[in-house]
Amino acid sequence: MSQRAFISLLILLAVLVALSATSFPGAMIGFLFGITIAFFVAGPAMLIGKVLENNGMAISGETALWLLAGFYALLVLFAAFQSWRRLQRQEPDQARSAGLRLALLVALPMMAWLSVNAMQDAWP
């Protein structure tokens, strides 16, 4: 990835984070985050929780949330380590790609929080 593309994508990501805090686009982004979480996080988490409960290992919803947050934190740490390692190996294109992945992983929770707050404020 070239440096110009990297900077352009970082600016677009910052604009998307800023739009997440506004009333209309932020509310729409929050709604889409809600649908995404409902289908791709909550559903599989409930299925895994039911399987664990049937096998004698009941876990609470709070424990499941902590496990998911820990998994996400590991993804962020892995992306940071991968970016640092590629910088050490003098691979700037791959380091930019990994850095953009890291920026996206950091921006997603920020966008979710801002957009859900915007959605709550815009709700009649």
Image (tube, rainbow, N blue to C red):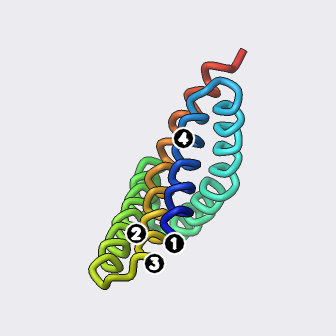
- Real-space CA distance between mark 2 and mark 3, rounded to the nearest whole angstrom: 12 Å
Disc sitting over residue 79 in the figure: 2
Residue tagged by mark 3? 94
Identify which amino acid the numbered label 3 is placed on. Gln
Front in this rendered view, residue 22 or 11: 11
Image position of 123 with respect to 33: above or below:
above
Whether pointer 1 and pointer 4 mark residues with C-beta atoms closer than 8 Å, the reply is: no
Q: Residue at x 70, y 44 (%)?
A: 32
Whether pointer 2 and pointer 3 mark residues with C-beta atoms closer than 8 Å, the reply is: no
- Real-space CA distance between mark 1 and mark 3, rounded to the nearest whole angstrom: 43 Å
Q: Earlier in the sequence, mark 3 or mark 4?
A: 4
Front in this rendered view, residue 110 or 91: 91
Identify which amino acid the numbered label 1 is placed on. Asn
Q: Earlier in the sequence, mark 2 or mark 4?
A: 4
Q: Earlier in the sequence, mark 1 or mark 4?
A: 4
Residue 33 in picture, x, y percent from top left: 64, 45
Circle 1 SS class: loop
Q: Residue at x 37, y 72 (%)?
A: 83
- Mark 2 or 3: in front is 3
